[in-house]
Image (tube, rainbow, N blue to C red):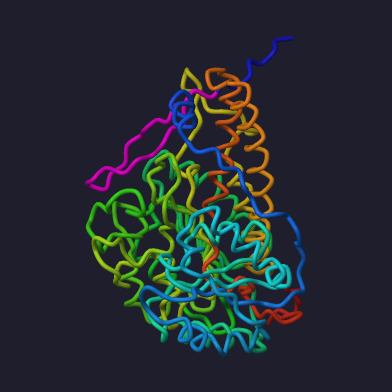
Amino acid sequence: MMTQTPFKPEYLELSRLNPDGTSQPGRFTVAEFARWMRAQPKSTRLPPDRFRGGGGPWRIVVPETTSSGPSRDALLEALGRLAHHRRAASPLFVDVESRRGGDKAIADWQERNCSALEEGAGGLLLVGSEADLPFLLQQKLAVNHQVGRLSFPSGDAYCAYAARVVRSEEPHSLQRPELVVFAPSSDSATCYSRDCLAQPILEVGESQALSTVPLIDGEARREHLLEALARSTPGRRQLLFSATHGRGGAISAPPGGPLDLGALECHGGQVLSAEDIRALPSALEDGIGVLFACYSGGVAGGVPSHPFLEFGRPAVGQDDRVASVANGLLLHPRGPLGILGHLGMIYGTRLRDAEGNTPPASLEPKSFDRLRAVMDDLSRGRSLDDASWRMGALFRAAYEHYCRTLEWISREGLYDDEDAVTTLFLEWLDVEDLKGWIVLGDPVVRVWSASSGTVYRDGSKQRAG
């Protein structure tokens, strides 16, 4: 009986965008990873894993002072209707030193506010620009809490969103949600996600008797997606799943200039931008979107900001015309209730060995299993916070495991040990994947009424949560 040779990763195959918008394969080798890791600071601090349980009060987290846009008090006033609806506890304020001081300052802020945070297990809504509330804060809080985020340019936009959420949770008679799956196949990365994500998610929807709209391969055209987003059927909300490349972002300038920033790539080289969404009569109205896109081109080392929050880089100014598609949807007066975004190293990548072979299923990106589980939960009426909380728990476990391996390699001086570095490389990929999750919107929203149960027009009843 022959023994199968263990798969030995040699490099990570990346899909990088060229200046003209086309993509080309790139590589990040295990040896390059070892050199890069040796130079990184060895910070492994995480907040204590204290309290993880539902039922606590819902809270808003705002900056003590704002650098642009609405003031702290204006933000709280704009969301007053939603706070009243949620029976919110008193808000938490983030001071300038905490938000600018990096990892340690944020951990210290969490420690100072630990009592209130432990009470706030019913959901935390971070409100404000990324300059005032960095994504790192959201990422740290999401380890132990259900966290959502709003980042709008005006108080009116916050007011409109709050009213939309409150209105959506009035008693409704709903049909089962419509599932829209958007997945162009322009290169090996998008073909991969089409086969491993889009098709299985369609099967999940069909198994639950959902109405499905498959926009896959040649059907994944810009005009088809716009048509699906604009469709508003009384009594039926939408779940959107999109898997494609994103333009621009925190690492590289967008190929088409400012208006391409945050755009999604469609079939035939077309792109769909926030500007396109703004022109629609409605845009995923009262639905939920799950957007799976890599804006960073797979550049190692993480990103200083999160492209799903973009209103524009400093070079092009703060202008909502160049918002990401995610924020463009939420800014629409008849837009969705929330967006679950995923930005990760894993999308557009494949592990390869020295001969170019791909790994067995056990080493495939875990994000695919997670995304399928998230879509299954959302289609059954679970809220965004379920997904957020699950990802936080997984991130903690993956990060602590990675830190133990890193400390062992550093202590024993094993940066030149091929097997040890390969193990660390695989664990790092898992951490990077989980670092890319973000919930935009109130974390406790659902694709149908968040009451104890919703009666559908077909007579069935779905428990929420």
The N terminus lies in quadrant = top right
Is-magenta flag for residue 23? yes
- 10 left or right of 174? left
Residue 428 in which image quadrant: top right
* Residue 354 x, y percent position in the rendering: 48, 18
Q: Which residues are magenta?
A: 9-29
Q: Position of residue 464 (x, y in %)?
A: 73, 74
Q: Which one is in front, 382 or 114?
A: 114
Residue 349 screen position, x and y as percent: 46, 38
Residue drawn at (58%, 20%) of the image: 414
62 and 139: which is toward the camera: 62
Residue drawn where x is 24% and y is 52% of the image = 255
Q: Nearer the viewer, residue 69 or 30?
A: 69
Residue 103 percent coordinates (x, y): 53, 53
User: Which residue is at the front of the view, 131 or 390?
Assistant: 131
Residue 398: in magenta span = no
In the image, residue 349 above or below residue 206: above
